[in-house]
Amino acid sequence: MSMVPLIVKGGYGEHGRSCFLFPFQKNKYAMLDCGIMDTDPQPFPVVEPELLRRTEYLFLSHCHKDHSGAFEHFREAGFKGWLVAAAPTVKCAGIDYDRTILLPDPKGGLEEEVTLKGGLSFFYGRTGHCAGSIWLHFFGAFGSLLYSGDYQKRTLAYAVDPIRGRQADLAILDCAHVGYEEDGDGLRGAMTERIRQIVKEGRRVVMPLPKYGRGLEIICMLRRDLPEVRIGAEENMVKLTRQTLSYSQWVRPEAAQEIRRFLEENPISALEKGEYDVLLIGDTHLEQPESQELAREEAEKGALTLLTGRVKKGCLTERLLKEGKAFTMAYPHHQSRRDLLEMMEENEFHGALPFHNNRKEVFWGNSALYL
Ligand SMILES: [Zn+2]
Ligand SMILES: [Zn+2]
């Protein structure tokens, strides 16, 4: 066993700002993600200029801002290395950078080993979190390190290459839903049950959803588990869904067909005619004036807003929550604590850091330590 000297700059003991580094050769570093904490007045991970200059490779696990948002900031601060990511990540994060290595879309099955100049080798696969989202498994003279990125294997829409049967000296593992003992299926079951009850009471459910991510999952969940529930969607939601479907290698084929059928049934017209029980809005914090108007109108008519992600301070979502017109529930697009423990059992990790939550916990051999 080797000791991988990991440098943590964000994402451990906090929900956002993911940024980890390790030396893969003397004085040469690889960085895993460069996220921000957009609720913090100082949102960036603090990386010393010398360390930034020695960062040869910056890997982005996916496009979400809590993993990619500090890229421009690091560039201005002196990062001149290579950016390594899947094509949808670079596109959706809006990054335009000359020194970019695009990883080919994974095709499932046995992953191929990649070796970059300077002798950094790794495997990668899809995490089921959004288009372009990958896990990475590095190995070399420094030992072996696995980074799960944002991960959930029990998906409905996104394709997954499960992290299974892997060995690593150190693993950095998603455990964003740390407070939940159910696995992904259990969390989803609780959500559909709650929606079923609200609709039965004759009320509507409004679901604001992020630009890239769980929208496709929610469409599949509603259609499969609540076929009697009518779904409406506004224009932006439909546009974003179409865009994600175009990354065909990242969506399960049967789910892509199902979502296409949903789009053909014209959810925008369902909204215009008022023929819906659940309304999907492609604006996760309700920041656009049109979505604010729509959500307000629905709330005044008795609808409940279901928030499935982080609640951003000062947004309409927070106000609706305070007024008792909204409620929160976790959609499993990350790992719960049970998912994490299952992953620990299915792999051989000597040490593991669960990240993406407010706890500070380390698994070492058979022990769990709380810092
Ligand atoms: Zn994410
Ligand atoms: Zn994240």
Image (tube, rainbow, N blue to C red):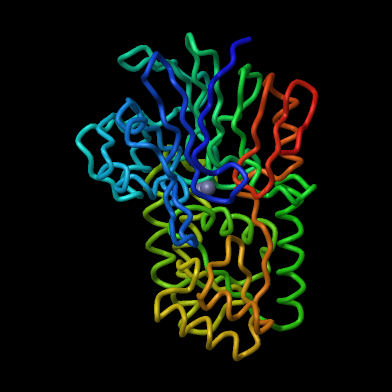
Q: Nearer the viewer, residue 33 or 282?
A: 33
Q: Position of residue 41 (x, y in %)?
A: 45, 62
Quarter occupied by residue 227: bottom right
Residue farthest to the bottom? 300
Using residue 288 as the reference point, say whether residue 74 is left or right of it: left
Q: Position of residue 267 (x, y in %)?
A: 48, 70
In the rendered view of the protein, which quadrant contains the C terminus? top right
Q: Position of residue 296 (x, y in %)?
A: 53, 86
Q: Residue at x 59, y 32 (%)?
A: 172
Q: Residue at x 75, y 68 (%)?
A: 194
Q: Residue at x 65, y 50 (%)?
A: 358
26 up-or-down from 335: above or below: above
Using residue 315 as the reference point, say whether residue 206 is left or right of it: right
Using residue 56 as the reference point, say whether residue 129 is left or right of it: right
Quarter occupied by residue 309: bottom right
Using residue 90 as the reference point, say whether residue 263 is left or right of it: right
Q: Residue at x 59, y 55 (%)?
A: 220
Q: Nearer the viewer, residue 199 or 79?
A: 79
Q: How many marks?
A: 0
Q: Position of residue 269 (x, y in %)?
A: 45, 77
Residue farthest to the left? 98
193 up-or-down from 147: above or below: below
In the rendered view of the protein, which quadrant contains the N terminus? top right
Q: Nearer the viewer, residue 242 or 10?
A: 10
205 up-or-down from 113: above or below: below
324 up-or-down from 343: above or below: below
